[in-house]
Amino acid sequence: MTITDFLERIQLDRDYQGQIRHIETIPAREAAYGELARPIPGVLRTALAGAGIERLYSHQVDAIEGIRDGRNVVVVTGTASGKTLCYNVPVIENLLDDPNAKALYLFPTKALAQDQLKALTRLASLDGTLTDLVRTGTYDGDTTRHTRRKLRDEGNVILSNPDMLHAGILPYHAKWNRFFKDLKYVVVDEIHTYRGIFGSNVANVLRRLRRVCEHYGSSPQFVCSSATIANPKELAERLIGLPVDIVEKDGSPRGKKYFVLWNPPYVDLTKMERRSSNVEGHWLMAELIAEGFQTIAFGRARVVAELIYRYTKDTLERRKPEYASKIKAYRGGYLPQERREIERQLFSGELMGVASTNALELGIDVGSLDAAVIVGFPGTIASSWQQAGRAGRASDESLAVLVAYNDPIDQYLMRHGEYFFRQSPENAVIDPENKYILSKHLRCAAFELPVTDGDETLFGKLTRPIVELLEEFHDLKELDGRYYWATTEYPAREVSLRTISDATYTIVDVAQDNSVIGVVDGISALELVYPEAIYLHEGETYFVRELDLEQKVAYVEKKEVDYYTQPVLESSIRILKEKQTKTWRGDQVFFGDAAVTWVTSAFKKIKFYQLDSIGWSNLDLPQIQLSTAALWLVPARDLMHEIREMGRNPVEGLVGIRNMAISVLPLFSMCDRRDIGGIVDSSNTGSPTMFLYDRYEGGLGFAETGYHAIEELMRGCLELVSECECETGCPSCVGLPVLRPAIQQDQEGHAGAWPIPDKESARLLLEAMLAR
Amino acid sequence: MSEDFKDRLSRIGRPGGGPTRTRRKVRPKPARLEELAGVVRTDGVLVVDRSVGDLATPDSLAETLSAIERTGRTVGARGDIEEEVRTLLGHPEGALFIDTETTGLAGNLVFLLGAMRIEKGDVRLTQVFARDYREERALLESWIEMLSRAEMLVSFNGKSFDMPILRDRLGYHGLESPDEPPHLDLLHPARRRWREVLPDCRLQTLEWRLCGRKRAGDIPGEEIPGVYHHFVRTGEMADILTVFHHNALDLITLADIALALSAPEDDPA
Ligand SMILES: [Zn+2]
């Protein structure tokens, strides 16, 4: 059976009720090969042949030639297109030439570094010379002291991550002096993950890396890779601060691919409720697997991956019992060795399917699958394509299905299939010169090496004023025009590159001698393993007996129940300190400090396969608080009244403006949409108020920029809403932002909680504001 | 990030933010370290060279130290003394006792290098001091010179601390690290010898239990980096002199420990 046959067959199934809303066909592509101007050295050619690689694809040739020419390169090609060879070949052939040369590979996660280590050692093991030549290993938080020293002293290809480079390598560069002296290549993999705050931080870490290299007399070349985004070349250049050549013509072959938009049917004639998307998704997955198609399902939250896994296993036990044991769940929080094992089994074909979160969206090599079932729009076009990219055989047909939730955004996409396929993937924006981020990294930089005039070319024109300010505050001391670190502090420790806290909770099974069955980050813990929660692990139901907040341990035990639990979250904002205020066209605008808090206040019990709650309990858990900078706008009362007079809801209008402002503000403050949060609230000022805040402890100047540019910001919103061709509101104007602080919630059962606000209300309110 | 700093930072680069510098440069008071007794060099780095006998230390010290020379002649055949200690005591003139002061752990710089050696019946102490961050390089050049003359290094925890950081800093400055002579790190024999009878084997514990000395007016090790940064910023001498003293005492105790290790097992000095 081919995928084409499958699509025909499914439409004849008695459970089919017209769910397919759109089928996009992506034609097959022939392989395009290339020849290198200078052949690959013999030993490496032997190893490659041993790995079954006799010829290189055109994009691999383009990348290798660029690197051989000494240029920086970014490779933007699909999953499983052989991206890794683009850098492994030049790095190894250079090592054959110069055994002293060194390379540093950076991956956004430890898991990816592990995966690439496996690939690199496998390649090197295919030839005795290479086995001796390539001395490699991962250098990260899990590396033992002994291995660290060995890698530092002897390693020539080090695999690490930006966080480790920032806090565990650069501050100790003197220990690495031989490594940096001969550093020839820096590989930055999956750069599309480095956007917004994280990306701006990483860009500064890479600048620090470049100046440390310069100190030791090296000037490494950069090789980047990226998934498809709107601006990979620009992102790479902003990240490393150097010109970059782009290689994007994918020469790897691809079979024909279908991308299907799938909307679960209404449950009855009232047309209020749709069939559960998790149930629909699992059905598709089970049918695909039963027909022999290796399939991956993606869910937005961990619980979704677990549910789909559980349902699919159940169904397969009836439908195709021999496959029921050949599926697994995969998500963050599983222990590393469990994850490695699943990846291996998926790659080898032992597994027929896996139900995953976006943990598998990143480039871990699990081979190519036949089908990807994406349950719920992942939030960005780029992510959707990445998840879809997991399916795609070299010659056979493949299938990606987006199963919609019954929420406004997903439903919009179902109604407007052409919108989804026409939309270009998102831009990745970073701002290395954000002065809050920059000042933190200039402190780290000064700790590493005195800051000199020359550093302005790396860090930009704000370098001098910031460095002078740091001297004034006694962090630095100027001597002969060089600014030295002059305190006992250790600045790298104070800077976290990511926005998510790294406190980790462990989940232990009390019935199994308290053995650890999983981990969860500090923020998610309170949404996932609260007391009496049902924690799903490999599809099994575990009851949470106790959550020890002090020791950061959740005690669970297996318990057969027919329900799972979902947290109920409450969030709020409180003004801490008003710092600036102004009257803008008759409305009052403020800038200051605010605390955004959220808490799991209760939980619901939901029966498997159902959507409705069968029970509810209150919880008494601590709040999570983000103290940050915010701007808030209080529209004058008469203005709101005016809109009401026109028969529109002004508060809904304000919500629409908030959603747009979150998309527009990044254009001024150079951040990612996800770096900004927003709330419409009346409790602080006594009347409806729009808050926009930085989603980073202490704030990073985004809301501040918005405060100063409130006129431009509001004009931008008006343009957006006026020019949007939709009728009553869509994800491109008043609709999109996902503002939920929670990430571990199943979107189902919350449908309708965030309707797309009325477009006209927002437009009228903006016009009225700007007309004054 | 302090509130003050954030407020000032927020003005940078804003229209009307303008230059915010109102402060006059604080010039360090003229340093008078150069007037210390025993200063032998002030170009690029400050070097103090003194006889340990000149230091304001308990009288017994000079005696203990010269006892090393006497003991050395009698330990040659004693099997109950660890071999390296025997080598040291048998030929103390070739040994260089070292102790460094740094601005912290890895990633920081070395600002004071104390080196002690026994020379014709006199115990000489050389302290090389970087008066500011720029002088670390010259300090390390002095170190290279000393290292190339030493026949043996004696330290306390120097294998894990002083030597790695010195090597790192040489690498940082692009200076060639010379061949290192044998290194006797007294922490290890001391641990083997007294682990059972002493609460811990920190240098100052040994100093108190073996030599019966308690330091008065000494500076706790963790405060030393801060004192140095303060000195660089202000040029104020008082506290940094305590660090010189601390460093000298550490070296003298080092010699005491070596001697104590030569005593029979059942007699903890
Ligand atoms: Zn629209």
Image: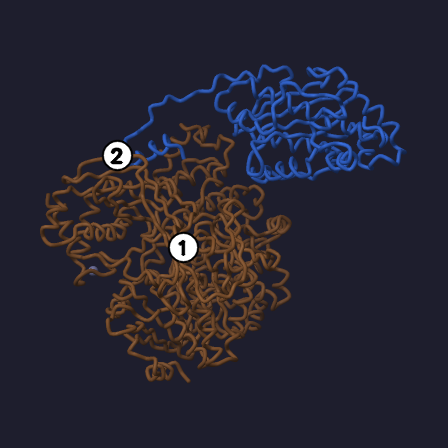
Q: Are marks 1 and 2 on the same chain?
A: yes
Residue, disc 1: A617
Return the residue nearer the eye: A771 or B52: A771
The answer to whether residue A429 is left or right of residue A188 is left
Which amino acid does the dot numbered 1 rest on?
Answer: Ser
Answer yes or no: is residue A553 visible.
yes
Question: Alpha-carbon distance for marks 1 and 2?
Answer: 42 Å
Q: Is residue A585 left or right of residue A198?
A: left
| Ligand 1 picture quarter | bottom left
What hue represents chain B? Answer: blue
| Whether label 1 touches label 2, CB < 8 Å | no
Label 1: chain letter? A
Q: Which residue is mark 2?
A: A580
- Where in the figure is residue A133, as x and y percent of width and height? 61, 60
Please state if B80 lies on the left or on the right of B197 as rendered: right
Where is residue A739? Give x, y as percent: 32, 53
Mark 1 neighbour density, 10 Å: few (under 14) some (14–19) many (20 or more): few
Q: Secondary structure at mark 2?
A: strand
**A461 lies above or below A180:** above
Q: Colour of chain A?
A: brown
Between B101 and A327, the one nearer to me in the picture: A327
